[in-house]
Image (cartoon, rainbow, N blue to C red):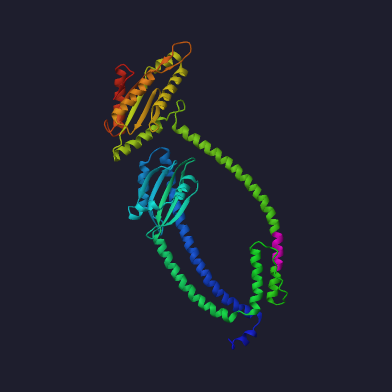
Amino acid sequence: MSAASPRLKGLGLSSRLALSIAALALVALVAVGWALVGLSRNLALQAQREQGVALLQSLAPSVARAVAVNDLADLDDHLAETVLHVQPSWTSILYLEAFDAAGNPLLRAANGSELSRRAGGFLEPAFLSCALETQDACWQFVGGPAGESLMFLSVPANSGLRWGTVVGAFDLDTFETLSQRWSRRAMLFAILMAGLAYLFIWFGLSRMVIVPLSRLAHAARRVQDGDLSARVELGRRDELGQLGEAFDSMAERLQAHTAELEHKVAERSAQVRQQNQELERVNANLAGINAQLERLATTDPLTGLHNRRYLQKALDFEVARGQRAEHPFCLLMMDIDHFKRVNDTYGHAVGDRVLVTVAQILQENLRNIDLRARWGGEEFVVLLLDSEPASGLEVAEKIRSVLEQTSVEVGLDEPVRITISIGVACSPTHGVDEQKLFAHADAALYRAKEDGRNRVEG
């Protein structure tokens, strides 16, 4: 050090700064390299999360559509196919699970591994609450008791309305192995570079450079923290003095410019708030319109029951479910007796009142899980879920009996009495496909009509 000092004292400020900056650059290189490793890991982890969110978002429309029409068979196959054949980079899908809007689990597809069977136990209530309530994607990183590293993601399944939620669990073990390897290499590199930097700093820094640079750095930190009144005021004529004067001048201009910007930002923020409020109103109107369109597409406008299209889809699903595992259900075909005579005698307005009365009886005397639909004209169809033939005949007889005691007032004349004929077909007793069930129910309804009406036949 004693042999090098005279030569260092003979160097100009620019040379001493060049030497000092070279040493600091090495230190900065180590720090930046280390920071970049951490940043790379965070970015890679974010990329995995975004890939997972994108995958769930691609599944969300299918989930929303399946829940909206109660058609879960195809969705079950779709989730299983996704788990087996679609894998984000550096991760693997443990399982995918679909929930309805009330938080009830609908379907779950897993990859069959031991971890996929245990992963559900790592979910925290806060994540499930976020997944089922928020309109944005939710995520959670969890470490298992055996060193597992998992990522849970969820996205809402929307189609104008919130129909459900898709939740996915991803195994991050491969990603963590790669991340640890990167960290070890970065640490070795940082140790090597730090040693070299120490040697350069030892010979490069001097008191003449450190003090003014410290004052400049301190003023810069104050400005960074928001204190725009900070000044260096070195009072020197060398290069550092000129740098200090330039910094003070820049800080003064920045202070004036910031005040002007704050005024403009306040004005712009007010405009943005007004635009956001208008956008919220438009979105609320669109949500109402979408809900109304959904009701119109699946509801009979006169009776308020489901229409033929909706019941057809529900029946298709029940038939498919029954073919995979035995799920009994009954199909009731109903026809109002002498309905044409009512229209011809009292007019179509009274006929409409009769139809509405029948629909009301069906609403009041069936379970919430049973599906009621106006099939067309004076015909109604009811789908009794999880029902055996005996209970199907019992429910049909109850409806027939209630309607037999019901009448519609038409003014001064005698009230219109309502009776109905019902044909019952049950799966799998009378068939396991839609065609056979309708054929049996139609034949039973025909017998009820032939045998005098106001009857139930099965």
Identity of the residue drawn at 29% across and 40% down: 325
- Position of residue 11 relative to residue 127, above or below, is below
x, y percentage for residue 176?
42, 62
x, y percentage for residue 363?
42, 27
x, y percentage for residue 73?
35, 41
Q: Quadrant of residue 433?
A: top left
Q: Quadrant of residue 115?
A: bottom left
Identity of the residue drawn at 51% across and 75% down: 194
Image quadrant holding the C terminus, namely: top left
- Position of residue 22 relative to residue 221, above or below, is below
Where does the magenta region start and end? 248-257
Magenta segment's dominant SS is: helix
Closer to us: 365 or 265? 365
Image quadrant holding the N terminus, namely: bottom right
- Position of residue 317 relative to residue 136, above or below, is above
x, y percentage for residue 396?
34, 25
Residue 196 falls inside the magenta stretch: no
Residue 254 falls inside the magenta stretch: yes
Closer to us: 197 or 71? 197
Identity of the residue drawn at 58% across and 42% down: 280
Which residue, as the protein is rendered here, is positioned at the far bottom? 3
Query: Horizontally, is 297 left or right of 244 in the view?
Result: left
Query: Horizontally, is 60 left or right of 316 in the view?
Result: right
Res. 439 visible in picture: no
Res. 241 visible in picture: yes
